[in-house]
Amino acid sequence: MTGKQFENAIIQQGQPLTIVGETITDKVDLSSNIIATGVLIENCVFEDVVFFEKIDLNCGVEFKNCVFKKTFSINDCNATNYDHHFNFYNSHLEFSNTTIEGLYFNGVNQLQRGIGIKENTNINILQVRTVICSMGSFSINDSTINRQLDISQAKIQNDISIRGISVINAKIRFENNEVGSYVFTDATFNKDIHIWAGKVNSLTFNDGIFNDDLSITGVPISGYLTVIGTEFKKSIVFKLWDETNQKQGKLTKIYISSGKFGEQFIVNGNNYEIEDLVIDTSKQLEGALYFNSTNIVKAKISGDNYNSNIVFNHSNFNELIFDFFVTSQGRNVKKQFEFVKR
């Protein structure tokens, strides 16, 4: 099938429309709207570049078991319609068990019900600019990103999430995104991660492995920062004031339990207020936690502390509670806590 034949096939009617088992031999440049109530493209190979340019995807498109040997660019597209059967998983664009050399979102793409990358999809370069998902998420589940993962200027109602047995070999850059939450669950991250500016309701780390540094700079988090069962082999640093770019971050509520911090967990607070801090110590909580120049309204520390060292440096408390807190046998409490006066 030629690129032109594919372009003609995908704009036909269907409930949904299916294209199966085709090899598209040359460039695809789709500039006509999709009218089918969903398009399923399965077991297809795209030999050349693919462009979706300024079109309405209607109820959306799913690529399943496909191969893109070159790049796929989605530029200034939109999708707002809904079909109960086709949109069962609540995404307007999905990739399942698909291999892509480069996936690019350029211009302003309004894909109302979100984007899903799942089921062993493998992407070398994923670059996102100004995606708007007013009712959905941008999710990566059980998939691999190899060389680049950049998302900027996105507005995502629900979350940007990386879950399951996903492996991220690329550096991650999330910049100036407005999202319901960032979620990192069960996945493995092999390069450094930088999250900068934007607006976030919550940030969750749950049972993942981070093999390099992670920095969160100038990001206002209005809800919870949650760390449970995650291993950070290097440092994780929250910097609430970005002096260079004049960006102010925020940590509102913090819950930490059963994490492993290979180097340090650091909050550089710039004397901003944190409403609530809960640290639940146990054998599974390991490493050094530093809270520098923070004003904490309420802090509660509980559990049996074996392997963590917690330092409050130039910090204030309105209320500090030790709730059934026990230091491990034979350890000096001064080695587990340090309070540094102003």
Image (cartoon, rainbow, N blue to C red):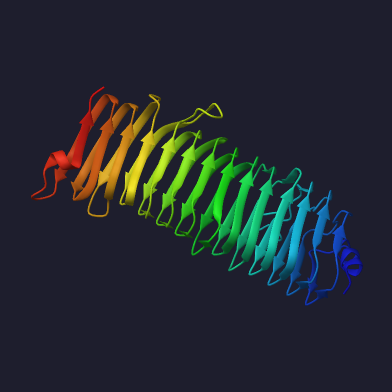
- Answer above or below: position of 247 versus 256: above
Picture quadrant where residue 297 is located: top left
Query: Is 39 on the left or on the right of 116, as rendered?
Result: right
For the C terminus, which image quadrant?
Answer: top left
Instruction: From the top left corner, tell me how far across and down residue 85 is, in percent.
Output: 70, 60
Instruction: From the top left corner, tell me how far across and down residue 10 is, in percent.
Output: 85, 64
- Answer above or below: position of 201 versus 97: above
Question: Which residue appears farthest toward the bottom when viewing the image?
Answer: 21
Query: Is 99 on the left or on the right of 80, as rendered?
Result: left
Please name the residue shown 84% across and 73% down the image: 25
Instruction: From the top left corner, tell me how far across and down residue 215 is, in percent.
Output: 46, 43
Question: Which residue appears farthest toward the left when viewing the image?
Answer: 330
- Answer above or below: position of 176 versus 11: above
Query: Is 268 on the left or on the right of 218, as rendered?
Result: left
Please name the residue shown 43% across and 33% down the image: 251
Question: Which residue appears farthest toward the front when viewing the image?
Answer: 244
Please name the residue shown 63% across and 57% down the image: 116
Q: Is residue 89 visible?
A: no
For the N terminus, which image quadrant?
Answer: bottom right
Q: Nearer the viewer, residue 186 or 50?
A: 50
Q: Nearer the viewer, residue 90 or 61?
A: 61
- Answer above or below: position of 312 versus 62: above
Please name the residue shown 65% across and 44% down the image: 135
Q: Is residue 275 visible?
A: yes
Instruction: From the top left corner, tell me how far across and down residue 31 is, in percent.
Output: 88, 54
